[in-house]
Image (cartoon, helix red, strand yellow):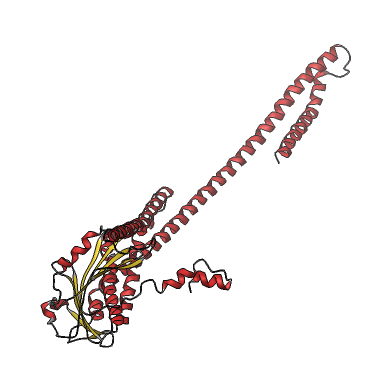
Protein backbone atom coordinates (compact mmCIF):
# COMPACT_ATOMS: atom_id res chain seq x y z
CA UNK A 1 0.00 0.00 0.00
CA UNK A 2 1.40 3.41 -0.95
CA UNK A 3 1.84 6.24 1.51
CA UNK A 4 -1.01 8.18 -0.11
CA UNK A 5 -3.37 5.15 0.07
CA UNK A 6 -2.39 4.45 3.68
CA UNK A 7 -3.17 7.97 4.79
CA UNK A 8 -6.39 8.07 2.75
CA UNK A 9 -7.65 4.87 4.38
CA UNK A 10 -6.58 5.82 7.91
CA UNK A 11 -7.57 9.45 7.71
CA UNK A 12 -4.10 10.55 8.95
CA UNK A 13 -2.47 13.70 7.64
CA UNK A 14 1.12 12.85 6.62
CA UNK A 15 4.21 15.00 7.11
CA UNK A 16 5.16 16.55 3.76
CA UNK A 17 8.54 14.76 3.81
CA UNK A 18 7.29 11.38 5.04
CA UNK A 19 7.34 9.65 1.66
CA UNK A 20 10.78 11.06 0.84
CA UNK A 21 12.21 9.92 4.16
CA UNK A 22 10.72 6.45 3.81
CA UNK A 23 12.28 6.07 0.38
CA UNK A 24 15.69 7.49 1.27
CA UNK A 25 17.09 4.19 2.56
CA UNK A 26 16.04 2.59 -0.72
CA UNK A 27 17.35 5.40 -2.91
CA UNK A 28 20.36 3.47 -4.25
CA UNK A 29 19.65 -0.23 -3.86
CA UNK A 30 22.21 -2.92 -4.66
CA UNK A 31 21.48 -4.81 -7.88
CA UNK A 32 22.25 -8.52 -8.13
CA UNK A 33 24.96 -9.23 -10.69
CA UNK A 34 25.80 -12.36 -12.61
CA UNK A 35 29.37 -13.62 -12.70
CA UNK A 36 31.31 -13.14 -14.98
CA UNK A 37 30.71 -9.44 -15.61
CA UNK A 38 32.60 -6.48 -17.00
CA UNK A 39 31.87 -3.06 -15.51
CA UNK A 40 32.94 0.40 -16.69
CA UNK A 41 32.29 3.12 -14.13
CA UNK A 42 32.52 6.87 -14.85
CA UNK A 43 32.14 9.83 -12.49
CA UNK A 44 31.85 13.49 -13.48
CA UNK A 45 31.81 16.54 -11.26
CA UNK A 46 28.50 18.33 -11.81
CA UNK A 47 27.06 21.52 -10.45
CA UNK A 48 23.30 21.91 -10.10
CA UNK A 49 22.66 23.06 -13.67
CA UNK A 50 25.05 20.42 -15.05
CA UNK A 51 23.25 17.68 -13.11
CA UNK A 52 19.95 18.80 -14.64
CA UNK A 53 21.57 18.76 -18.08
CA UNK A 54 22.91 15.26 -17.38
CA UNK A 55 19.37 14.07 -16.63
CA UNK A 56 18.08 15.61 -19.86
CA UNK A 57 20.95 14.10 -21.89
CA UNK A 58 20.25 10.64 -20.43
CA UNK A 59 16.56 11.02 -21.19
CA UNK A 60 17.36 11.91 -24.81
CA UNK A 61 19.84 9.01 -25.06
CA UNK A 62 17.28 6.49 -23.82
CA UNK A 63 14.51 7.96 -25.95
CA UNK A 64 16.63 7.73 -29.11
CA UNK A 65 17.16 4.01 -28.47
CA UNK A 66 13.55 3.27 -27.66
CA UNK A 67 14.11 2.12 -24.08
CA UNK A 68 12.68 3.18 -20.74
CA UNK A 69 13.46 6.78 -19.79
CA UNK A 70 14.20 8.19 -16.31
CA UNK A 71 11.33 9.91 -14.54
CA UNK A 72 11.42 13.63 -13.86
CA UNK A 73 13.49 14.53 -10.78
CA UNK A 74 14.97 11.02 -10.44
CA UNK A 75 18.38 10.73 -8.77
CA UNK A 76 19.08 7.16 -9.86
CA UNK A 77 18.03 5.09 -12.84
CA UNK A 78 18.87 1.70 -14.34
CA UNK A 79 18.05 0.66 -17.88
CA UNK A 80 18.84 -2.34 -20.09
CA UNK A 81 20.32 -2.03 -23.58
CA UNK A 82 20.11 -5.56 -24.96
CA UNK A 83 22.64 -7.55 -22.98
CA UNK A 84 24.20 -4.48 -21.37
CA UNK A 85 22.86 -2.32 -18.55
CA UNK A 86 23.44 1.30 -17.52
CA UNK A 87 23.06 2.56 -13.95
CA UNK A 88 22.94 6.35 -13.61
CA UNK A 89 23.15 8.15 -10.26
CA UNK A 90 23.12 11.83 -9.35
CA UNK A 91 24.93 12.80 -6.14
CA UNK A 92 25.48 16.10 -4.37
CA UNK A 93 28.43 17.22 -6.51
CA UNK A 94 29.01 14.43 -9.00
CA UNK A 95 27.16 12.14 -11.39
CA UNK A 96 28.06 8.53 -12.14
CA UNK A 97 27.45 6.21 -15.09
CA UNK A 98 28.02 2.49 -14.54
CA UNK A 99 27.93 0.20 -17.58
CA UNK A 100 27.58 -3.56 -17.09
CA UNK A 101 28.58 -5.90 -19.90
CA UNK A 102 28.27 -9.69 -19.79
CA UNK A 103 31.77 -11.17 -19.95
CA UNK A 104 32.50 -14.19 -22.11
CA UNK A 105 35.37 -16.60 -21.53
CA UNK A 106 37.99 -13.96 -22.19
CA UNK A 107 41.05 -13.26 -20.10
CA UNK A 108 41.09 -10.43 -17.56
CA UNK A 109 40.21 -7.03 -19.02
CA UNK A 110 39.50 -8.36 -22.49
CA UNK A 111 38.36 -6.85 -24.78
CA UNK A 112 40.14 -3.55 -24.05
CA UNK A 113 38.20 -0.99 -22.04
CA UNK A 114 38.50 1.56 -24.84
CA UNK A 115 36.42 -0.76 -27.05
CA UNK A 116 33.61 -1.06 -24.51
CA UNK A 117 33.74 2.62 -23.63
CA UNK A 118 32.28 3.61 -27.01
CA UNK A 119 28.85 3.08 -25.44
CA UNK A 120 29.54 6.05 -23.17
CA UNK A 121 30.35 8.39 -26.03
CA UNK A 122 26.69 8.62 -27.06
CA UNK A 123 25.88 10.59 -23.90
CA UNK A 124 26.95 14.21 -23.64
CA UNK A 125 29.60 14.72 -20.95
CA UNK A 126 27.86 16.55 -18.07
CA UNK A 127 30.92 18.04 -16.38
CA UNK A 128 34.66 17.58 -15.69
CA UNK A 129 35.64 13.92 -15.89
CA UNK A 130 37.20 12.56 -12.69
CA UNK A 131 36.82 8.76 -12.41
CA UNK A 132 37.13 5.91 -14.91
CA UNK A 133 37.13 2.35 -13.55
CA UNK A 134 37.39 -0.92 -15.44
CA UNK A 135 36.20 -3.70 -13.12
CA UNK A 136 36.28 -7.34 -14.26
CA UNK A 137 34.25 -9.74 -12.14
CA UNK A 138 35.45 -13.29 -12.78
CA UNK A 139 34.41 -16.64 -11.43
CA UNK A 140 36.55 -18.85 -9.23
CA UNK A 141 37.99 -20.89 -12.10
CA UNK A 142 41.68 -20.15 -12.58
CA UNK A 143 43.87 -17.71 -10.70
CA UNK A 144 45.56 -15.23 -13.06
CA UNK A 145 48.96 -13.90 -12.08
CA UNK A 146 48.18 -10.47 -10.68
CA UNK A 147 51.61 -9.11 -11.59
CA UNK A 148 50.71 -9.51 -15.28
CA UNK A 149 47.87 -6.97 -14.99
CA UNK A 150 48.94 -4.60 -12.22
CA UNK A 151 52.00 -2.62 -11.16
CA UNK A 152 53.65 -4.76 -8.46
CA UNK A 153 54.90 -1.72 -6.51
CA UNK A 154 51.35 -0.53 -5.86
CA UNK A 155 49.41 -3.79 -6.16
CA UNK A 156 46.92 -4.55 -3.40
CA UNK A 157 45.00 -7.78 -3.03
CA UNK A 158 42.57 -8.77 -0.33
CA UNK A 159 40.12 -11.47 0.59
CA UNK A 160 36.81 -9.72 1.22
CA UNK A 161 33.30 -10.43 2.42
CA UNK A 162 34.36 -13.28 4.74
CA UNK A 163 36.46 -14.92 2.06
CA UNK A 164 33.72 -14.87 -0.54
CA UNK A 165 35.78 -12.94 -3.09
CA UNK A 166 39.25 -11.69 -3.96
CA UNK A 167 39.77 -8.05 -4.98
CA UNK A 168 42.98 -6.78 -6.59
CA UNK A 169 43.92 -3.35 -7.98
CA UNK A 170 46.85 -0.93 -8.18
CA UNK A 171 45.10 2.49 -8.17
CA UNK A 172 46.86 3.41 -11.44
CA UNK A 173 45.41 4.31 -14.82
CA UNK A 174 45.98 1.89 -17.70
CA UNK A 175 46.84 3.13 -21.23
CA UNK A 176 43.12 3.79 -21.79
CA UNK A 177 42.86 5.96 -18.67
CA UNK A 178 40.96 3.38 -16.57
CA UNK A 179 41.85 2.20 -13.07
CA UNK A 180 41.65 -1.59 -13.23
CA UNK A 181 39.99 -3.70 -10.54
CA UNK A 182 39.93 -7.48 -10.69
CA UNK A 183 37.34 -9.35 -8.60
CA UNK A 184 37.19 -13.12 -8.33
CA UNK A 185 33.87 -14.38 -7.03
CA UNK A 186 34.61 -17.47 -4.97
CA UNK A 187 31.25 -18.13 -3.32
CA UNK A 188 29.08 -15.00 -3.29
CA UNK A 189 25.48 -15.18 -4.50
CA UNK A 190 24.30 -12.57 -7.00
CA UNK A 191 22.89 -10.07 -4.42
CA UNK A 192 26.04 -10.08 -2.28
CA UNK A 193 28.23 -9.88 -5.36
CA UNK A 194 26.27 -6.82 -6.50
CA UNK A 195 26.65 -5.17 -3.09
CA UNK A 196 30.40 -5.87 -2.99
CA UNK A 197 30.86 -4.60 -6.54
CA UNK A 198 29.14 -1.31 -5.73
CA UNK A 199 31.14 -0.81 -2.54
CA UNK A 200 34.44 -1.40 -4.31
CA UNK A 201 33.47 1.12 -6.99
CA UNK A 202 32.57 3.60 -4.25
CA UNK A 203 35.95 3.15 -2.55
CA UNK A 204 37.80 4.28 -5.67
CA UNK A 205 35.27 7.02 -6.50
CA UNK A 206 35.31 8.50 -2.99
CA UNK A 207 39.11 8.20 -2.86
CA UNK A 208 39.41 10.41 -5.94
CA UNK A 209 36.86 12.88 -4.61
CA UNK A 210 38.64 13.06 -1.25
CA UNK A 211 41.96 13.86 -2.91
CA UNK A 212 40.45 16.76 -4.86
CA UNK A 213 41.38 18.90 -1.86
CA UNK A 214 45.11 18.20 -2.26
CA UNK A 215 45.75 20.40 -5.34
CA UNK A 216 43.71 23.12 -3.67
CA UNK A 217 45.81 22.80 -0.51
CA UNK A 218 49.03 22.94 -2.54
CA UNK A 219 47.77 26.05 -4.37
CA UNK A 220 46.80 27.80 -1.14
CA UNK A 221 49.91 26.97 0.90
CA UNK A 222 52.03 29.85 -0.54
CA UNK A 223 49.16 32.29 0.09
CA UNK A 224 48.82 31.16 3.70
CA UNK A 225 52.59 31.47 4.14
CA UNK A 226 52.49 35.00 2.71
CA UNK A 227 49.65 36.10 4.99
CA UNK A 228 51.45 34.64 8.02
CA UNK A 229 54.66 36.49 7.08
CA UNK A 230 52.82 39.81 6.71
CA UNK A 231 51.06 39.21 10.01
CA UNK A 232 54.45 38.77 11.69
CA UNK A 233 55.62 42.07 10.19
CA UNK A 234 52.53 43.87 11.45
CA UNK A 235 52.81 42.46 14.97
CA UNK A 236 56.50 43.40 15.04
CA UNK A 237 55.62 46.99 14.10
CA UNK A 238 52.92 47.01 16.79
CA UNK A 239 55.63 46.63 19.46
CA UNK A 240 57.25 49.91 18.36
CA UNK A 241 56.43 53.41 19.59
CA UNK A 242 52.67 53.79 19.15
CA UNK A 243 51.12 56.69 17.31
CA UNK A 244 47.58 57.11 16.14
CA UNK A 245 48.59 57.47 12.51
CA UNK A 246 50.78 54.34 12.50
CA UNK A 247 48.15 52.35 14.40
CA UNK A 248 45.50 53.31 11.85
CA UNK A 249 47.83 52.16 9.08
CA UNK A 250 48.55 48.84 10.80
CA UNK A 251 44.86 48.29 11.51
CA UNK A 252 44.07 48.84 7.83
CA UNK A 253 46.75 46.25 6.92
CA UNK A 254 45.30 43.71 9.37
CA UNK A 255 41.79 44.28 8.04
CA UNK A 256 43.05 43.74 4.50
CA UNK A 257 44.80 40.50 5.48
CA UNK A 258 41.67 39.23 7.21
CA UNK A 259 39.53 40.10 4.17
CA UNK A 260 42.00 38.31 1.88
CA UNK A 261 41.96 35.21 4.09
CA UNK A 262 38.15 35.19 4.26
CA UNK A 263 37.90 35.52 0.48
CA UNK A 264 40.14 32.48 0.01
CA UNK A 265 38.37 30.58 2.80
CA UNK A 266 35.04 30.95 1.02
CA UNK A 267 36.52 28.98 -1.88
CA UNK A 268 38.35 26.22 -0.04
CA UNK A 269 36.11 25.61 3.01
CA UNK A 270 33.64 23.44 1.05
CA UNK A 271 36.41 21.47 -0.64
CA UNK A 272 38.23 20.74 2.62
CA UNK A 273 34.99 19.77 4.34
CA UNK A 274 34.14 17.47 1.43
CA UNK A 275 37.59 15.89 1.66
CA UNK A 276 36.97 14.94 5.29
CA UNK A 277 33.52 13.55 4.47
CA UNK A 278 34.72 11.47 1.51
CA UNK A 279 37.69 10.13 3.45
CA UNK A 280 35.32 8.90 6.15
CA UNK A 281 33.19 7.21 3.47
CA UNK A 282 36.27 5.43 2.13
CA UNK A 283 37.15 4.14 5.60
CA UNK A 284 33.56 3.08 6.19
CA UNK A 285 33.42 1.10 2.92
CA UNK A 286 36.73 -0.57 3.76
CA UNK A 287 35.35 -1.71 7.10
CA UNK A 288 32.16 -3.02 5.51
CA UNK A 289 33.88 -5.23 2.94
CA UNK A 290 35.91 -6.83 5.78
CA UNK A 291 39.16 -7.31 3.86
CA UNK A 292 42.03 -9.58 4.81
CA UNK A 293 45.47 -9.66 3.20
CA UNK A 294 45.81 -12.09 0.30
CA UNK A 295 48.99 -13.85 -0.90
CA UNK A 296 51.27 -11.54 1.08
CA UNK A 297 50.03 -8.51 -0.86
CA UNK A 298 49.02 -5.45 1.20
CA UNK A 299 45.33 -4.81 1.72
CA UNK A 300 43.54 -1.74 0.37
CA UNK A 301 43.27 -0.27 3.86
CA UNK A 302 46.99 -0.70 4.50
CA UNK A 303 47.95 0.77 1.12
CA UNK A 304 45.63 3.77 1.44
CA UNK A 305 46.78 4.39 5.00
CA UNK A 306 50.35 4.64 3.74
CA UNK A 307 49.70 6.51 0.45
CA UNK A 308 46.45 8.44 0.95
CA UNK A 309 46.56 9.49 4.60
CA UNK A 310 49.57 11.82 4.19
CA UNK A 311 47.62 13.78 1.58
CA UNK A 312 44.53 13.88 3.82
CA UNK A 313 46.64 15.07 6.75
CA UNK A 314 48.16 17.79 4.56
CA UNK A 315 44.68 19.04 3.71
CA UNK A 316 43.52 18.89 7.32
CA UNK A 317 46.70 20.62 8.52
CA UNK A 318 46.19 23.50 6.08
CA UNK A 319 42.55 23.78 7.11
CA UNK A 320 43.65 23.99 10.76
CA UNK A 321 46.36 26.53 9.84
CA UNK A 322 43.95 28.87 8.12
CA UNK A 323 41.50 28.60 11.03
CA UNK A 324 44.23 29.45 13.55
CA UNK A 325 45.55 32.21 11.27
CA UNK A 326 42.08 33.76 11.16
CA UNK A 327 41.98 33.70 14.99
CA UNK A 328 45.41 35.35 15.21
CA UNK A 329 44.38 38.07 12.76
CA UNK A 330 41.23 38.78 14.74
CA UNK A 331 43.17 38.90 18.02
CA UNK A 332 45.78 41.25 16.57
CA UNK A 333 43.10 43.48 15.04
CA UNK A 334 41.19 43.61 18.34
CA UNK A 335 44.37 44.45 20.26
CA UNK A 336 45.28 47.20 17.82
CA UNK A 337 41.73 48.52 17.76
CA UNK A 338 41.78 48.69 21.56
CA UNK A 339 45.04 50.63 21.47
CA UNK A 340 43.60 53.01 18.88
CA UNK A 341 40.53 53.54 21.06
CA UNK A 342 42.72 54.25 24.09
CA UNK A 343 44.79 56.75 22.11
CA UNK A 344 41.63 58.46 20.85
CA UNK A 345 40.27 58.63 24.39
CA UNK A 346 43.58 60.12 25.56
CA UNK A 347 43.37 62.72 22.81
CA UNK A 348 39.77 63.48 23.75
CA UNK A 349 40.75 63.88 27.39
CA UNK A 350 43.60 66.21 26.46
CA UNK A 351 41.22 68.16 24.28
CA UNK A 352 38.71 68.48 27.10
CA UNK A 353 41.43 69.63 29.47
CA UNK A 354 42.53 72.19 26.93
CA UNK A 355 38.95 73.36 26.51
CA UNK A 356 38.57 73.64 30.28
CA UNK A 357 41.75 75.67 30.49
CA UNK A 358 40.57 77.96 27.72
CA UNK A 359 37.22 78.32 29.49
CA UNK A 360 38.96 79.34 32.72
CA UNK A 361 41.07 81.83 30.83
CA UNK A 362 37.98 83.23 29.13
CA UNK A 363 36.28 83.51 32.52
CA UNK A 364 39.23 85.40 33.98
CA UNK A 365 39.35 87.64 30.94
CA UNK A 366 35.63 88.16 31.22
CA UNK A 367 35.96 89.12 34.89
CA UNK A 368 38.76 91.51 34.03
CA UNK A 369 36.75 93.04 31.20
CA UNK A 370 33.75 93.22 33.52
CA UNK A 371 35.73 95.20 36.08
CA UNK A 372 37.04 97.55 33.42
CA UNK A 373 33.53 97.95 32.09
CA UNK A 374 32.22 98.95 35.54
CA UNK A 375 35.00 101.54 35.86
CA UNK A 376 34.40 102.93 32.39
CA UNK A 377 30.61 103.12 32.78
CA UNK A 378 31.00 104.69 36.23
CA UNK A 379 33.40 107.28 34.77
CA UNK A 380 30.93 108.28 32.08
CA UNK A 381 28.01 108.40 34.55
CA UNK A 382 30.01 110.53 37.04
CA UNK A 383 31.03 112.84 34.17
CA UNK A 384 27.41 113.31 33.24
CA UNK A 385 26.49 113.95 36.84
CA UNK A 386 29.30 116.55 37.03
CA UNK A 387 27.74 118.45 34.12
CA UNK A 388 24.36 118.19 35.80
CA UNK A 389 25.70 119.46 39.15
CA UNK A 390 27.39 122.48 37.48
CA UNK A 391 24.16 123.35 35.72
CA UNK A 392 22.17 123.10 38.89
CA UNK A 393 24.78 125.22 40.74
CA UNK A 394 24.61 127.98 38.12
CA UNK A 395 20.83 127.99 38.47
CA UNK A 396 21.22 128.34 42.27
CA UNK A 397 19.34 125.09 42.71
CA UNK A 398 22.28 123.06 44.08
CA UNK A 399 23.37 124.29 47.53
CA UNK A 400 26.79 122.62 47.52
CA UNK A 401 29.80 122.92 45.31
CA UNK A 402 29.47 120.91 42.01
CA UNK A 403 32.91 119.45 42.54
CA UNK A 404 32.00 118.16 45.97
CA UNK A 405 28.70 116.75 44.72
CA UNK A 406 30.50 115.00 41.90
CA UNK A 407 32.99 113.52 44.34
CA UNK A 408 30.24 112.32 46.62
CA UNK A 409 28.44 110.64 43.72
CA UNK A 410 31.44 108.54 42.68
CA UNK A 411 31.04 105.66 45.19
CA UNK A 412 27.29 105.62 44.75
CA UNK A 413 27.56 105.44 40.97
CA UNK A 414 30.32 102.82 41.12
CA UNK A 415 28.34 100.55 43.44
CA UNK A 416 25.17 100.99 41.43
CA UNK A 417 26.84 100.21 38.10
CA UNK A 418 28.58 97.16 39.63
CA UNK A 419 25.26 95.84 40.95
CA UNK A 420 23.55 96.37 37.60
CA UNK A 421 26.34 94.58 35.65
CA UNK A 422 26.37 91.73 38.15
CA UNK A 423 22.59 91.32 37.86
CA UNK A 424 22.78 91.24 34.05
CA UNK A 425 25.57 88.59 34.16
CA UNK A 426 23.64 86.38 36.58
CA UNK A 427 20.50 86.62 34.47
CA UNK A 428 22.48 85.45 31.41
CA UNK A 429 24.03 82.58 33.36
CA UNK A 430 20.59 81.53 34.63
CA UNK A 431 19.19 81.60 31.07
CA UNK A 432 22.13 79.48 29.79
CA UNK A 433 21.57 76.92 32.54
| 168 lies left or right of 408 | left
Quadrant of residue 388 in the image?
Answer: top right
Q: Furthest residue to the left? A: 148
Residue 27, located in which quarter of the rendered image?
bottom left
**Residue 405's spot in the image, x, y percent?**
82, 22
Regarding residue 126, the answer to whether it shows in the image is no
Residue 225 spot, x, y in % from top left: 29, 61
Is residue 43 shown to the viewer in this render?
Answer: yes
Q: Residue at x 55, y 44 (%)?
A: 354
Residue at the image position 45 percent from the left and 58 percent from the top: 334
Residue 292 as seen in the image, left or right of residue 364: left
Please state the horizontal and vertical placement of residue 329, each as a whole percent of the image: 39, 59
Q: Position of residue 74 (x, y in %)?
A: 38, 64
The answer to whether residue 366 is left or right of residue 229 is: right
Q: How many marks?
A: 0
Say which of 368 and 262 sits in front. 262
Q: Nearer the viewer, residue 218 or 415?
A: 218
Amino acid sequence: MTDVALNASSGLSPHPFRAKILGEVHARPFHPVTTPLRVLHFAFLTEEHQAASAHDALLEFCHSRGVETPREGANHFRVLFGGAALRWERHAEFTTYTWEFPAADYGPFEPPSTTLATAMFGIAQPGPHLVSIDLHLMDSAGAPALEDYFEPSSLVAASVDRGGAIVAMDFKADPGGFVRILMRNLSLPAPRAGALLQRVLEIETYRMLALLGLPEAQRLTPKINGIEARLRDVTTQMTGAPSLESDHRLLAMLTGLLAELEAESAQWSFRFGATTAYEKLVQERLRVIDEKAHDMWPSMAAFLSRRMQPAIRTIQMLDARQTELARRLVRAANLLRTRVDVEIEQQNRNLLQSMNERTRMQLRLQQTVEGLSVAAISYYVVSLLGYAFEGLSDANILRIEPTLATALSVPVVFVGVALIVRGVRRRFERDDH
